């Protein structure tokens, strides 16, 4: 029996609390995972897990073995990584989750750069705003927008954007253009609800503090692209990320309002598990993301005029085929970040 392999399988089963999930994230048949745990228990002469129909529980022996196995695997990874990083570029599969709008408009158009620098890393990009349990789902790193809740994850701020308050010409023609925050109470907004179900109201910086304005609403969505589309269709006032609203502002489909009142800045952070040794794959990816955002003024929280930062006309030569899997959102073949490059 390969004891290191058995340790990895056992630790993974405990992390995700499921034989099936452990098999999926390790790329193994479920039967193989079950057999490995059974052989490990037989070799040790103890029961490590108490199995029920709903969950797995560690025995006292299992808890002791988990502590020792985790320490051994972390030490081994640290030793191997120190040699690997010194003699070759990072390699292997890297699974990342991020908001669809950032992935589609900013990251995907620039992925060829990352692949050119790190051709041995295979990216798996999940584009969603849903909550992600990195350990349970085998995700290496996530990008999240907004203030972060307390967690055991390591967070690194990589960028920020400032929303823009806007509405369609048809909405403004029907309801008038508000000029003060107080007038917003007589208007309608499109609501955005987060992963927790909370409805987000328009917010502005006022006297050094964030001020939220309660508004009536007729429709609520939990997708950033749908949120902007609702604004374009005249369903209400929206406060969207400027990098998403910019093409509609340029075309006239949306009109910026309340320019004297700045919406609160939204930080963008990369989060990854708190390991003793940060994976080289995660490190180079997060460094690259920070560099991409640094090149893009809109992703650093800057407000730009509509005729500035036109990067859509700059397209690199078609890159070689990239080993990248994208789920949830289909990429627009003509889509490109309007402000990078």
Image (cartoon, grey):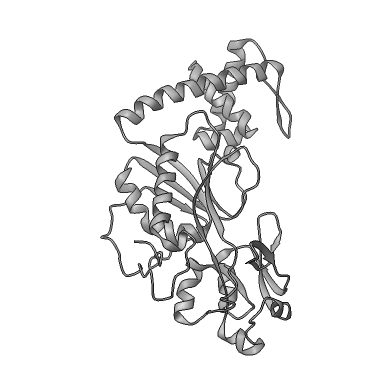
**Location of residue 83 in the rendering, given as x and y in whole percent from the top left corner:** 35, 25
Q: Nearer the viewer, residue 314 or 30?
A: 314
**Location of residue 174 in the rendering, given as x and y in whole percent from the top left corner:** 64, 89
Q: Nearer the viewer, residue 315 or 182?
A: 182
**Location of residue 78 in the rendering, given as x and y in whole percent from the top left corner:** 45, 25
- Residue 331 can be seen, yes or no: no
Residue found at the far left of this picture: 317
The relative height of residue 155 versus residue 311 in the rendered view (above or below) is: above
Toward which corner of the image does residue 167 lie, by quadrant? Answer: bottom right
Q: Is 136 situated left or right of 310 in this image?
A: right
The relative height of residue 223 versus residue 308 in the rendered view (above or below) is: above
Q: Nearer the viewer, residue 311 or 221?
A: 311
Q: Is 55 situated left or right of 159 in this image?
A: right
**Location of residue 45 in the rendering, given as x and y in whole percent from the top left corner:** 64, 10
Toward which corner of the image does residue 312 lie, by quadrant? Answer: bottom left
The relative height of residue 181 versus residue 203 in the rendered view (above or below) is: below
Residue found at the far front of this picture: 207
* Figure label count: 0
């Amino acid at each position: 029996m390969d004891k290191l392999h058995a340790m990895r399988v056992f630790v993974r089963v405990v992390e995700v609390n499921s034989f099936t999930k452990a098999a999926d994230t390790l790329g193994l048949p479920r039967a193989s995972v079950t057999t490995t745990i059974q052989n490990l228990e037989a070799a040790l002469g103890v029961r490590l897990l108490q199995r029920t129909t709903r969950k797995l529980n560690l025995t006292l022996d299992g808890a002791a073995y988990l502590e020792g196995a985790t320490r051994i695997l972390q030490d081994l990874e640290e030793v191997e990584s120190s040699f690997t990083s010194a003699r070759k570029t990072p390699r292997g599969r890297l699974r990342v989750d991020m908001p669809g709008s950032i992935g589609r408009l900013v990251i995907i158009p620039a992925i060829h750069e990352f692949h050119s620098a790190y051709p041995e890393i295979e990216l798996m990009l999940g584009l969603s705003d849903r909550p992600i349990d990195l350990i349970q789902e085998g995700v290496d790193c996530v990008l999240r927008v907004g203030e972060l809740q307390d967690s055991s994850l390591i967070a690194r701020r990589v960028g920020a954007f400032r929303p823009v308050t806007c509405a369609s010409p048809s909405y403004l023609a029907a309801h008038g253009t508000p000029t003060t925050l107080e007038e917003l109470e007589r208007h309608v907004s499109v609501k955005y609800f987060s992963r927790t179900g909370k409805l987000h109201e328009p917010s502005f910086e006022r006297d050094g503090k964030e001020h939220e304005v309660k508004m009536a609403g007729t429709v609520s969505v939990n997708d950033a692209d749908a949120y902007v589309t609702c604004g374009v269709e005249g369903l209400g006032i929206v406060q969207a990320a400027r990098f998403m609203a910019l093409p509609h502002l340029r075309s006239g489909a949306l009109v910026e309002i309340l320019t004297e009142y700045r919406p609160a800045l939204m930080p963008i952070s990369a989060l990854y598990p708190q390991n003793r040794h940060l994976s080289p794959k995660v490190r180079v990816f997060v460094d690259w993301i920070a560099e991409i955002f640094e090149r893009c003024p809109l992703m650093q929280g800057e407000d730009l005029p509509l005729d500035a930062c036109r990067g859509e006309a700059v397209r690199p030569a078609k890159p070689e085929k990239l080993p990248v899997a994208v789920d949830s959102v289909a990429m627009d073949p003509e889509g490109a970040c309007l402000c990078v490059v």
